[in-house]
Every structure is written in structure tokens, then in C-alpha cells.
Image (cartoon, rainbow, N blue to C red):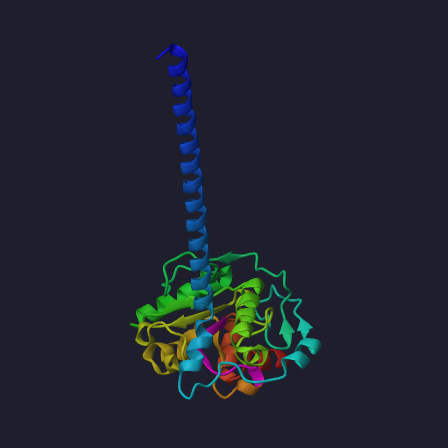
């Protein structure tokens, strides 16, 4: 075999080897992209299910009472008032007072409390002042032999829109209107609300939490730390939402003490002050 033939064969083998390496590289790259995509979809699904848990659990409890009372949302949307005093801890976000789509609290932090989940997630966040007093509340509970877990805090406008849109796809708009807040109308967007639960109800957001020792302690003591039970039993016609013993809202100690003593809602407090 002459030198020229050996050189051509060597070059041919080198060319095939380069093609093989390129092919392997492409396969590895595609696997990497698919792996990241699967992880991203899994995280999104988990996030959606966790944020939507209060709705699902509310429907499972008792006589399957829906978590939101029925009303004509279309009329409310036409007449609602866009909130423009959102830096105040007394900010109102409900079916007639809507936060703007671009509102994101500037002082969001993660309070140093026990959460019902381990992964990093925006729903761990609250506005700084509320976060500090949530830590004080959890410490006070611990001192009293009560163990609380934070479940869901801040939720963006877009996150709420995704939850609402998904619910519309699942059950239709009429049904969705009854159980999910419109984007901009969720207190979680203010960064001043936190859903709280306990091991005794497996950290679910259910009405039975209000009958546990943890739920009773929370109702009787949260005002001392600047929080209120936002959606009280028997006040559904005023708040627009059914009873949620797990949903606490930061309003500051002065307002919380007044609301607790008068046994009124945040709507009534704002109306009279």
C-alpha cells in the first residue's frame, strides 16, 4: 500500500471521527435542553398546584362549599376602583378595589419562619414590615407551644392571572368566577397576606384549621402582632369571600387591635376611618 492510499484512509477515518463527535455533541445538547424543559414544566405545575391549593381544599371540605361566594364579576370589573395607595399597610384589594397589573412591592423579603415546603419560591415573600411581625407572631406561637407553618404569601398579578385562566379552562368562566380571584383583586399581590396552617391538618388550607388549637390560637392572638383573620365567618356579604381561618393579613398593630376589639372587617374599618 503506497503512502498516498494510507494518507487518504487516515483522513477518511479522521473525518468520520469528527462527524461522530459532532453527532454525539448534538445529541447531548438536545438531551440537556429536554431535561431543562421537563424540569421547568414540573416546577410550573407544582407552583400552580400549591398556589391553587386553597381553592381545591376549600371545595373538598364539608358540603363542598365553594371558597368564593357567587356574584356578578362582569359588573364589578366595570365599576371597580384601581387602588392608588398601595404603599399603605391598609391597602384594600378585593372584588371592587383592583391593584394595577404592574404593581410589585419594592420591599419583599423572606421572613425567617417555618414553611410547609422547602424550595425557593416567590410565595415565601412578604413586605418587610409584615415579614418582621410575622416572625414575631411565629415566635409568640412557639412560646405558647403552638407550631405554625407559612404556606403562601406574595403572588404576582401574572401568577394570579395564570391561576384564573387555568381554572377557566378546567371548569369554565362561570364556575371559575366563583372560586378564583380576578388578577389584581388578590390580597396576595399586596405582599401583606400570608396563608398559615399546621401539621394537624397536614398543612392544608381548609376550614377545619379554624377548629384546631393552632387555628384558635391564631384567631385569638394574631392581632397582637398586627394581623387580622381577613375573611371572617359570618362576614361573607361584606368581604365577598367565604370564611378562611388560615388567611391572615397585615394591617399594623393599631388597626389590628381596633378591628379585633370591634369585631369588624377591613372593609368596615376603612369605611369608618
Q: Which sits in the foreground, 18 or 195?
A: 18
The residue at the point 57 percent across, 63 percent down is: 158
Image height of 75 relative to 86, above or below:
below
For this orientation, the residue located farthest to the front is 1
* Residue 231 in the image, given as x and y percentages of width and height: 50, 80
For this orientation, the residue located farthest to the right is 78
Q: Which sits in the foreground, 18 or 126?
A: 18
* Residue 207 in the image, given as x and y percentages of width and height: 41, 81
| 25 displayed left or right of 95 | left
| 2 displayed left or right of 67 | left
Q: Quadrant of residue 199?
A: bottom left
Q: Quadrant of residue 183?
A: bottom right
* Residue 161 in the image, given as x and y percentages of width and height: 57, 67
Answer whether residue 184 is visible to the viewer in this image: yes
The residue at the point 43 percent across, 72 percent down is: 53
Range drawn in magenta: 238-249
Image height of 254 relative to 122, above or below:
below
| 5 displayed left or right of 80 | left
The residue at the point 50 percent across, 85 percent down is: 263
Q: Quadrant of residue 160?
A: bottom right
For this orientation, the residue located farthest to the left is 145
Amino acid at each position: 500500500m503506497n503512502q498516498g492510499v494510507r494518507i487518504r484512509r487516515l483522513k477518511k477515518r479522521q473525518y468520520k471521527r469528527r462527524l461522530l463527535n459532532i453527532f454525539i455533541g448534538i445529541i447531548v445538547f438536545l438531551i440537556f435542553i429536554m431535561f431543562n424543559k421537563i424540569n421547568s414544566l414540573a416546577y410550573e405545575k407544582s407552583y400552580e398546584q400549591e398556589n391553587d391549593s386553597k381553592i381545591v381544599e376549600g371545595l373538598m371540605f364539608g358540603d363542598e362549599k365553594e371558597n368564593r361566594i357567587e356574584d356578578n364579576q362582569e359588573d364589578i370589573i366595570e365599576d371597580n376602583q384601581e387602588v392608588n395607595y398601595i404603599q399603605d399597610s391598609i391597602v384594600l384589594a378585593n372584588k371592587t378595589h383592583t391593584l394595577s397589573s404592574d404593581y410589585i412591592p419594592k420591599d419583599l423579603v423572606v421572613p425567617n419562619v417555618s414553611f410547609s415546603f422547602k424550595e425557593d419560591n416567590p410565595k415565601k415573600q412578604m413586605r418587610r414590615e409584615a415579614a418582621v411581625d410575622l416572625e414575631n407572631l411565629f415566635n409568640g406561637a412557639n412560646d405558647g407551644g403552638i407550631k405554625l407553618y407559612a404556606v403562601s404569601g406574595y403572588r404576582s398579578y401574572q401568577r394570579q392571572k395564570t391561576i384564573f385562566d387555568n381554572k377557566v379552562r378546567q371548569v369554565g368562566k362561570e364556575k371559575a368566577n366563583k372560586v378564583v380571584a380576578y388578577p389584581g383583586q388578590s390580597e396576595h399581590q399586596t405582599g401583606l397576606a400570608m396563608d398559615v396552617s399546621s401539621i394537624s391538618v397536614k398543612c392544608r388550607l381548609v376550614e377545619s384549621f379554624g377548629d384546631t388549637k393552632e387555628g384558635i390560637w391564631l384567631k385569638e392572638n394574631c392581632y397582637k402582632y398586627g394581623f387580622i383573620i381577613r375573611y371572617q365567618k359570618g362576614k361573607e356579604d361584606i368581604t365577598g369571600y367565604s370564611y378562611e381561618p388560615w388567611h391572615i393579613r397585615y394591617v399594623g398593630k393599631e388597626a389590628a387591635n381596633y378591628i379585633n376589639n370591634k369585631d369588624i372587617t377591613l372593609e368596615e374599618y376603612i369605611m369608618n376611618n
